Image (spheres, grey):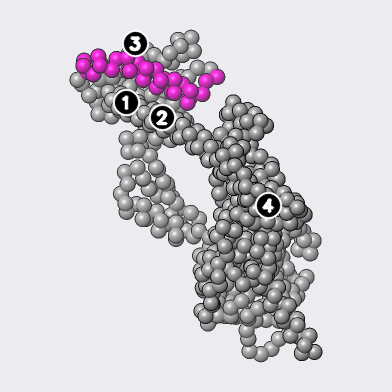
Amino acid sequence: MAERSQTVPEAGNDMGNDDAIGGNVSKYMVLPSGYCGQSKKGHLIFDACFESGNLGRVDQVSEFEYDLFIRPDTCNPRFRVWFNFTVENVKESQRVIFNIVNFSKTKSLYRDGMAPMVKSTSRPKWQRLPPKNVYYYRCPDHRKNYVMSFAFCFDREEDIYQFAYCYPYTYTRFQHYLDSLQKRNMDYFFREQLGQSVQQRQLDLLTITSPEDKSDLENSVMQKKIKIPKLSLNHVEEDGEVKDYGEEDLQLRHIKRPEGRKPSEVAHKSIEAVVARLEKQNGLSLGHSTCPEEVFVEASPGTEDMDSLEDAVVPRALYEELLRNYQQQQEEMRHLQQELERTRRQLVQQAKKLKEYGALVSEMKELRDLNRRLQDVLLLRLGSGPAIDLEKVKSECLEPEPELRSTFSEEANTSSYYPAPAPVMDKYILDNGKVHLGSGIWVDEEKWHQLQVTQGDSKYTKNLAVMIWGTDVLKNRSVTGVATKKKKDAVPKPPLSPHKLSIVRECLYDRIAQETVDETEIAQRLSKVNKYICEKIMDINKSCKNEERREAKYNLQ
C-alpha cells in the first residue's frame, strides 16, 4: 500500500495558510506528534486522489480531532464548498471529530438539518449522518472562516469509509449516461460537441425536441431571440409581395402581439378560434378538401381584443388531429356521464335498502325488549306469588306504556331509523334488594348500581362476570372449554354457562345502546365480551398463583 507518513505541522507556521494547499492528499497517514515506530490501527489514512475527490490537507489537533482543508474550485480560488475523501486503517469503536475549516459560504443548509454523506465498503449505499452530530459555525481560530464539524464513530476495522458533501455525480458517470442515450437513436435527442474545457474535457450540447422543430429551434437560437412562431403557407402575400418559403419545409413566420398581452394568451386564443371554426365546418371542409397542403383560416374571436393578430393558418393534418382529439374527448365524456348515472342509481338503491334495514332493526329491537320483559314478569310471578292469567300478562307486556307509545310515535315522525332506548333500570326487576337480569339470575342491588357507573366496556364486563359467577367459579372455568395452544399438556377446563354469557352480552348491549345507535359500533364492541372474560379469568389465576407463592415463601421462612 502506497502511503506516506507525516507529522502534523505546528499551528501558526506558514502551512496554516490556504495558499499552501496543493493537490489532493494521496494515502496520507496522520501520525501523532513525536510518535516513532510502526503504524498501527487508529492512525488514520486519508485519500482523495480519485475522480470528484477533494481534500488538500489534514492537521491533527488532538487524539480525536482533525482539521481538514479543502481545495478551491478550478479557476475560482474563492469558492470552497465541495469535499469528498476516504478514511481507512481505523480502529473499532474509534470516535473522531472532523472539522472542514475553510468553507467559503456564509449560509449553508447544514444549519437547517442537512448532513454530510457517508458510506463504507461493506455498506456501499450512501447515508446521511445524524443532523444532531453536525455543526456549522464561524470560527475565529481559522481566519474567521466558516467551519463545518461532525462527529463519527468507526465500527468496522476492515472497512474503508468515504465522506462527501452530498451525493457525488462524476463526469465519467455522466458521459456513460449520455453514451447510453445516444446508442438508443432517439429521434428527439441530439448530442453535439460544443467545445472543450480548460482541462481538455468534452463539453456537450444536448437538444431535446421533435425532429421537425429542430431546424426552427436552431434558427431561433442563432437569432438570439424568442418569438411566438406561426405556421404559414408556401406562398403568403405580405406587404404586397409574394414570399416563397419552399414546397417541402414550411417555415415559421413570427407575428406581433398586442400591447400588454402575453404570447401564451395570444397563441391560446388563436387555437381556440381555429378549433371553433373547424367544428362548424367539420363536414363541409372535409368534403371540399382533398389536397394535403390545404389550410383553414380563421380570425380569433373578439375583433376588439385581437385587431393586431393576423389570420391563424392551420394545415389540414393539424386540423384533422385536433378534430380527432376533440371527438375522442367527447366520447370519453359520454362514457363518464353514463358511468356517473349508473353509480347514482346504485346509490339510490343502496339508500332504500339501508332505510328498510334500519326499520327492521328497530322492530327487532322492540320485540326483543318486550320478550325480555315478558320473561322477567313470568319468572317473578311464578317464583314469588300466586299463579296469574297468562293472557293478562301477555296483554300487559305487548301493549307499550303510554310514555313508550308517545316516544315511538315521536320517533316515527323523524328521519332516524332507531328509537331511543329506554333507561337500563326500567328493563330489570327489583325485589328485596335484588335485581333480576333474566333467566333466573339475581344480583345484589347495591353492586348493580355501582356497576352502572363503571367506566369502559372492559371493566364493566369483568365486574359483571364476577357478580354472576364469582371468582371461585371463574378461576376453574374457560369461555370456550378448549385447551390453550400455548402449553402442550394443557387440560381443557369446563366452559361457562351459555345462557349466563348471553345475559352478560344483553346487559352490555343495553349499556352500549344508551351511548350510540350505530349497529356496526355496537356489534364491534359486543364481539369483545369473550376477550374481556378471558382476561378476567387470567387475572384471577395470576393473583391466585401469586398468593400461593407468598404463602409458600412465608411457610419457608
Residue type, label 4: Ser
Of the residues under marks 3 and 1, which one precedes in the sequence?
A: 3
Q: Which residues are magenta?
A: 260-289
Residue holding disc 3: 240
Spatial CA distance of label 2 from label 3 is 65 Å
Q: Residue at x 55, y 37 (%)?
A: 362
In this rendering, the count of numbered labels is 4
Q: Residue at x 32, y 14 (%)?
A: 280
What secondary structure is marked by label 3? loop
Q: Position of residue 223 (x, y in %)?
A: 44, 32
Nearer mark to the viewer, of 3 and 4: 4
Residue type, label 2: Arg
Residue holding disc 1: 327
Spatial CA distance of label 1 from label 2 is 27 Å
Which circle marks residue 384 in the picture? 4
Left/right placement of residue 203 relative to residue 329 reads right
Circles 1 and 2: CB atoms closer than 8 Å: no
Residue holding disc 2: 345
Circles 2 and 4: CB atoms closer than 8 Å: no
Q: Position of residue 450 (x, y in %)?
A: 76, 54
Q: Residue at x 48, y 9 (%)?
A: 304
Q: Nearer the viewer, residue 204 or 431?
A: 431
Of the residues under marks 3 and 4, which one precedes in the sequence?
A: 3
In the image, is residue 512 above or below residue 126? above
Spatial CA distance of label 1 from label 4 is 86 Å
In the image, is residue 330 above or below residue 106? above
